Image (spheres, rainbow, N blue to C red):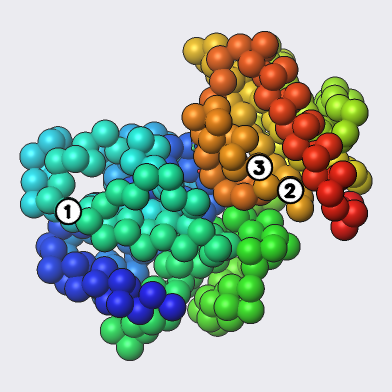
Amino acid sequence: MNEDIKLKILNKIKEYNRIIICRHIRPDGDAAGSTLGLRRILRLTYPQKEIYVINDDYSRDMAFLGEEDAQREDSFYTGALIIVIDTGSEDRVSNSRLGLAKEMIVIDHHIEREPYGAISWVEPERSSACEMVADFYASFKDELCMDTEAATCIYAGMVTDSGRFRFESVTGETLRLAAMLLDKNINTQKLFAMLYLDTLSEHKFHAYVLNKLKLTKNGVAYIYISLDAQRRFGLTSEQASNSVAYLNSLKGSIIWIAFIENEDGSIRVRLRSRFVTINQLAESYGGGGHAQASGATIYSLAEMRGFVRRADKLIEQYKSENDDWL
Ligand code: AMP
């Protein structure tokens, strides 16, 4: 699929000596894995080129996959190629110097709001951006090099963004590409331990979330995590944000939301669903994402209540028109 565009991307990569790879702010496994994985593939394949992953923010949770490169001065970007991966809109790219580069390529699996980049390879039906990087490698595997390190980064993103290969977006092709990566000797025991083991305080926080969650009439499960609660459990905002995953398996609750208070008083919204599509709801609050995993930022508890009401209406409508939900 999209062989032409992949070839164009490969040719651009060949054309440039300095390539800077970027991802979205607040990186998850897919953003970190896809950028670090592609960096490794390109460094192995083109040792004479300068290949960097440069972003303005940092994720402690994903640092085990590898360190990114330090931010550089403006002139460093002159004449460089930027490759942005896993980022649905330009304003979410974690690199304020983006515009200084000569050209930009976008590789992404979000529902596209406004196309950007000279070459834009976007497939929203893909389970992860890492799946696209794996597919890119598979298309040119006689030419590109991959090792255990690259495979581990890319596999990590495929595993995390697909809910461990459970989501509807997972296809036969996803698993064939994952199999190709596993053949590179990934240490899955270590990888899954790094990804999914929690500290005792995180487990206690999990219990707190289950005790505190609220459920609307039609089945929206939601939780508000104040800064105060984050401090009480000694959590980073990244750890507090994981609370959305604790709400994901309640029967009949087909939309669930974690609202996390940010340091500046704004509220991060992490929105998830089964069966029902929720990205338009996120978009109407200036956010976006995927059909069943989206996010936004809101600015007050009143706005939060409105958000929950609208999510509840979405469920009400969905349940009145469908009977295949659980
Ligand atoms: P998160 O809850 O942060 O994991 O985000 C879920 C999905 O929604 C990801 O694919 C994000 O890129 C996207 N997303 C999250 N927040 C926003 C936002 N404020 N604007 C646009 N997309 C977002």
Of the two numbered discs 1 and 3 in the rendering, the one whose residue sits closer to the viewer: 3
Residue 276: image tag: 2
Is label 2's Cβ within 8 Å of ligand 1? no
Task: Describe residue 18's horizontal placement relative to residue 172 as left or right.
Answer: left
Residue pictured at 68% horizontal, 56% vertical: 163
Task: Say which amino acid is labelled 1.
Answer: Glu
The answer for how far apart the CA atoms under marks 2 and 1 are is 38 Å
The extreme bottom residue here reads 142
Task: Say which amino acid is labelled 3.
Answer: Ile
- Asked if marks 3 and 2 touch (Cβ < 8 Å), the reply is yes
Task: Describe residue 8's horizontal placement relative to residue 291 as left or right.
Answer: left
- Tally the marks: 3
Chain-order first, disc 2 or disc 1: 1
* Local SS, label 3: loop
The answer for how far apart the CA atoms under marks 3 and 2 are is 6 Å
- Asked if marks 2 and 1 touch (Cβ < 8 Å), the reply is no
Residue 103: image tag: 1
Evaluate whether residue 184 shows in this view: yes
* Local SS, label 1: strand
Chain-order first, disc 1 or disc 3: 1
Residue pictured at 61% horizontal, 29% vertical: 269
In the rendered image, residue 265, in percent from the top left (x then y), is placed at 55, 11
Q: Quadrant of residue 228?
A: top right
Task: Say which amino acid is labelled 2.
Answer: Val
In the rendered image, residue 132, in percent from the top left (x then y), is placed at 45, 67
Q: Which residue is mark 3?
A: 278
In the rendered image, residue 109, in percent from the top left (x then y), is placed at 48, 57
Residue pictured at 86% horizontal, 45% vertical: 319
The extreme front residue here reads 321
Q: Dividing the image into 4 quarters, which one contains the N terminus?
A: bottom left
